[in-house]
Image (cartoon, helix red, strand yellow):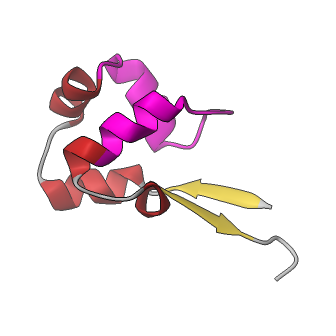
Amino acid sequence: MTITVNLSVLIARKGITSKELSRLVGINEQNLSLLKNGKIKGIRLETLNQLCKHLGCQPGDILSYEDDDQ
């Protein structure tokens, strides 16, 4: 089971900087960077909610699942 974080793609499409997004979402730039690089073990629903709000997307646009058996 692999969960992939597609946040970098969404940030690029939106044309927003990581610094600006971190300010809007209410998390520091270091934590946003860890999230973008998939170096996290979990995400708060409120953080996911704010990311979706400011990027104009759905949670499934940020996170995707791929079965390792395939």
What residue is shown at x 44% (from left), y 29% (from top)?
46
Please indicate, yes or no, whether residue 33 appears anywhere in the rendered image: no
Residue 21, image quadrant: top left
Quarter of the image with the C terminus in it: bottom right
Tell me where residue 35 appears, x and y as whole percent: 49, 36
61 relative to 43, above or below: below
19 within the magenta span: no
Compare residues 33 and 3 and report the one nearer the observer: 3
Q: In the picture provided, is 34 more to the left or to the right than 10? A: right
In the picture as drawn, the residue positioned furthest to the right comes out as 69
What residue is shown at x 64% (from left), y 33% (from top)?
42
Tell me the magenta residue range: 26-52
45 relative to 37, above or below: above
Please indicate, yes or no, whether residue 16 appears anywhere in the rendered image: yes
Q: In the picture provided, is 1 more to the left or to the right than 37? A: right
Tell me where residue 6 appears, x and y as whole percent: 44, 57
